[in-house]
Amino acid sequence: MNTGLRGISCVAAALLAGFVVYVPAVAAQPDLLRQTIADNDGWAAGTDGGSGAVEANIYTVTNRAELVQALQAGGNPTVAKIIRVKGVVNLSTDDSGKELTEKDYADPAYDVEAYRKAYAPSVWNVKLTDKKRPERELTGPLEEARKRSAARQKERVVIRLTSNTTLIGIGGDAKIVKGNLVIGAGTENVIIRNITFEDSFDYFPAWDPGDSWKVDTSYPGCQENFVDATTGPQQCPGGRWNSEYDNISISGGKRVWIDHCTFTDGDRPDHLFPPVYPFPHNMLEQKVQHHDGQVDITNGADLVTLTYNHFQGHDKTSLVGGSDSRTDDAGKLNVTYRANWFDNAGQRMPRVRFGKVHSYNNYFSGEAALPIKGAADLREKHAMALKAKGEAPVFRSGFGIGKESAIYSENNVFEIRNGGVGDAVAVQGGTRFFDQGSLVNGAPADFTAVLNKDPKKPIASDVGWKPTLYAKPPMPAGDVPAYVKANAGAGKL
């Protein structure tokens, strides 16, 4: 029986039986390779990628070299092209296909243990800058060696997509691993579908001593002026490891549709890389971070829709807007998230600056941290928190309300073990947020009450805009979990 006719028959039978049927929205075209985003499906409506490609510009790629070649489309990188991904494409390989690892990229002068010792808080943080925090720009031969190592890896694992491209996995096992796809400024009209993105691993993460650092006198010995090994700024909490690579970076690109993809850290999840410095620099957030975002949308990127994606077991999931200082991002960063599954994610689902973000019918599931009780002091509290942590990231926040952001949320569902509405949203410099119809742990989400506990910092529900681009009306929140789990991710087209 023709599968298309069988699908129509099933839908008709369901309708006759009185059931409401939600069918993933795509443009009505018979050829999967040439499907475009459905009319009005969010901010990326009108994106058609490489759907108009002639037969000569339809490629099948099985390795990095073939992918790089296909993106140039015979010398015309902007021509419409369809690139079919078959099997596993490893971006961390040489031209012969041999996998490259840390040893291959590392500069001869780089030594990770020597690096950690040289920039340890007990060494580096004993003197503050005029800004009353540790110097954030590391200097010295080991940092220079790290940068040279990082540059060698970056040159290999970062692949820049080109305009008018459809990148689509064939079958249910297509993967792009150990690298970073970038849709940069000047690149437009890109479709990415049915691919698992796995383990975009940074071998050379950088330690930032001043990230989240503060003088907190509740920590023993923490003060601005150095006295001795037990008293001074080196005893204050703060510092973070930062990595370089996302699975997909939309960095200035426009008109992008990402659909039915899976994002995962694979066999090297973050829990394998715990903090390396002793108290007070052993908080959960001070793990050695080797993965950055899964899909980050920054640097003036615009008109993006993400549908039916499965984000698995990752901390910093999706960032919209990279800096409060990029005020020229205002009017851009317009993004739609629909029917995605944020599965055991930690934060940034998304975290938004400046953009108008429409999030509806998404499913968020994870586990918040239980309060630490019975700790005799801060040292024991840190130790207990590290011991209590499981393999999945701690659910810290779903929506991040950042500077000049305008998030419009509808009929989303949060299931947060040990948590509640206060874990589903975080104020991070913004002043506006709207929600209607969402559920948190099975109950209607009263975001207004939670966000306005501090009357001095009210959060307005008028975000200054209202979505009009719907592929179909939002389904009831109660139907979202089963529907999203059944449809989100690679292999489910």
Image (cartoon, rainbow, N blue to C red):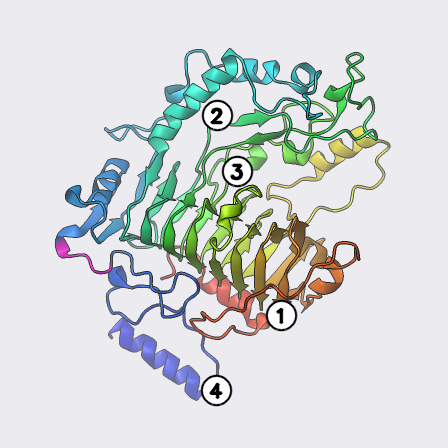
- The answer to which quarter of the image holds residue 77 is top left
Residue 403, horizontal then vertical, whole percent: 61, 49
Q: Secondary structure at mark 1?
A: strand
What quarter of the picture does the C terminus occupy? bottom left
Vertically, is 32 above or below 110? below
Q: Earlier in the sequence, mark 1 or mark 3?
A: 3
In contact (CB < 8 Å): disc 2 and disc 1 = no
Cα separation between marks 1 and 3: 34 Å
Residue 309, horizontal then vertical, whole percent: 45, 56
Residue 211, horizontal then vertical, whole percent: 63, 31
Q: Secondary structure at mark 4?
A: loop
Q: Label 1: how many residues lie within 10 Å, few (<14), some (14-19) or many (20+)?
A: some
Q: Magenta stretch?
A: 51-55
Q: Amino acid at mark 4?
A: Gly
What residue appears at the point 45 percent right and 60 percent down from the top-left corner? 488
Q: Earlier in the sequence, mark 4 or mark 3?
A: 4
- The answer to which quarter of the image holds residue 435 is bottom right
What quarter of the picture does the N terminus occupy? bottom left
Q: Label 2: how many residues lie within 10 Å, few (<14), some (14-19) or many (20+)?
A: many
Looking at the image, the residue that sits furthest to the front is 328
Judging depth in this view, the residue of 341 and 360 nearest the camera is: 360
Residue at the spot of label 1:
436
Residue 269 numbered mark, or none: 3
